Amino acid sequence: MTLLDEISEQPDVLARLFDSQRAVASAVADRWRKDPPTHVVIAARGTSDNAARYAQYLWGERAGLTVGLAAPSLFGSDAAPPRLTGAAVVGISQSGASPDLVAVVREAARQGRPTLAITNEPRSPLAEAADQVMLLGAGPERAVAATKTYTAQLGGVALLANAFAPMDGDDAAFGAVPEAVAAALATHAEVAEVGDRWRDVDRCAVLGRGTGLTTAHEWALKLQELAYVLAQPASTADFAHGPRAVVEEGFPVLGVATRGPWLADVRQTLEGLREIGARTLLVTDRPDDVRDVADDLLSIPATLPAWLTPVVSIVPAQLWCRQVALARGLDPESPRGLSKVTLTT
């Protein structure tokens, strides 16, 4: 099983997830309605942390929930953990094995708070520690760089958003996701050509806004893992508060420019960066709106509502990062210094 194989499995993984975990999402929503949380705390690391960013925006927008990311080091055996009064606590982890994440969920249970594990491993310590479990059902993921489990995590977050605050059209939207991911995968040849053209990138900024920031962070992480490129993700709003100063003639800027209320802001930022000579690459479902501010485009289907586009927008970015690694003579199957499961304490 190769990285490309696992990237290619994503439509099937998502279809299974939406079919099997909808009832779990409803049960979680029912549990939380009995003791409504004032906020949500999510414990996650790495790729799963980027799925948590999606929850920050989506659960805030759809359910009015303030979502914060836990500082797991505050929950170790020698720590005096913070109070979780009013919180629902969620652990997101592919392996469910990292002790620091498990410690957050266990402490939340000790404090009597509702807990949820979103994981690919039903017998993991994280699953055992939580009141409720959403299983990703992605099958074994052997590639070091997480791909299918990441989009499954996004799918799980989206299912929960729908359970918290159902909207007309959600069922049809979920049904369209696997097909949209398959269409994004079908652009592999075009993505590979773009990846070859960007083989010389050695540093870059990766920009997004709103739910697009989720993809920006994960794109940057994959580029660092697979191609050893120093990639700095940022909100376009935060980028204007200082980091913009690093941009000069030829500086590479990657961006997520998908439909929604943040598209105009991303476009405006890219216009300004192009004026000083930035080299730009965009993932977009609105190519006609941003073609003039991009040197290259990675296009995805314009078939999903804005809130679901992160599940698809990362897919061409995964393919592109793999191709950049190959074009640089690197082995994306064996990123140096990394292992599939990282146990932090």
Image (tube, rainbow, N blue to C red):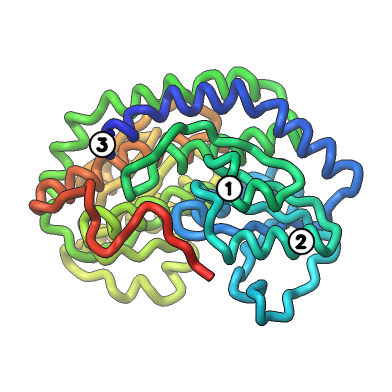
Other residues around mark 2 within 10 Å, as few (<14) / some (14–19) / many (≥20): many
Residue occupied by mark 1? 124
- For badge 3, the amino acid type reads Thr
Q: Where is residue 292 in the image (x, y as percent from the top left)?
A: 27, 43
Q: What element carries label 1?
A: loop
Q: Is residue 267 shown left or right of residue 73?
A: left
Query: Of the residues under marks 1 and 2, which one precedes in the sequence?
Result: 2
- For badge 1, the amino acid type reads Ser
Q: Position of residue 95 (x, y in %)?
A: 50, 48
How far is mark 1 from mark 2, CA to CA? 17 Å
In this view, the residue in front, 189 or 83, is 83
The C terminus sits in image quarter: bottom right
Query: Of the residues under marks 1 and 3, which one precedes in the sequence?
Result: 3
Q: Where is residue 125 in the image (x, y as percent from the top left)?
A: 61, 52
Q: Is mark 3 on a helix, strand or loop?
A: loop
- Residue at coordinates 13% horizontally, 53% vertically from top-left? 330
- For badge 2, the amino acid type reads Ala
Q: Which mark is residue 2?
A: 3
In this view, the residue in front, 15 or 344, is 344
Q: Which of marks 1 and 2 is in front?
A: 1
Q: What element carries label 2?
A: helix
Residue occupied by mark 2? 108
CB contact under 8 Å: marks 1 and 2 = no
Q: Is residue 300 shown left or right of residue 59?
A: left
Q: Where is residue 124 in the image (x, y as percent from the top left)?
A: 58, 47
Is residue 272 something that shows in the picture? no
In this view, the residue in front, 314 or 271, is 314
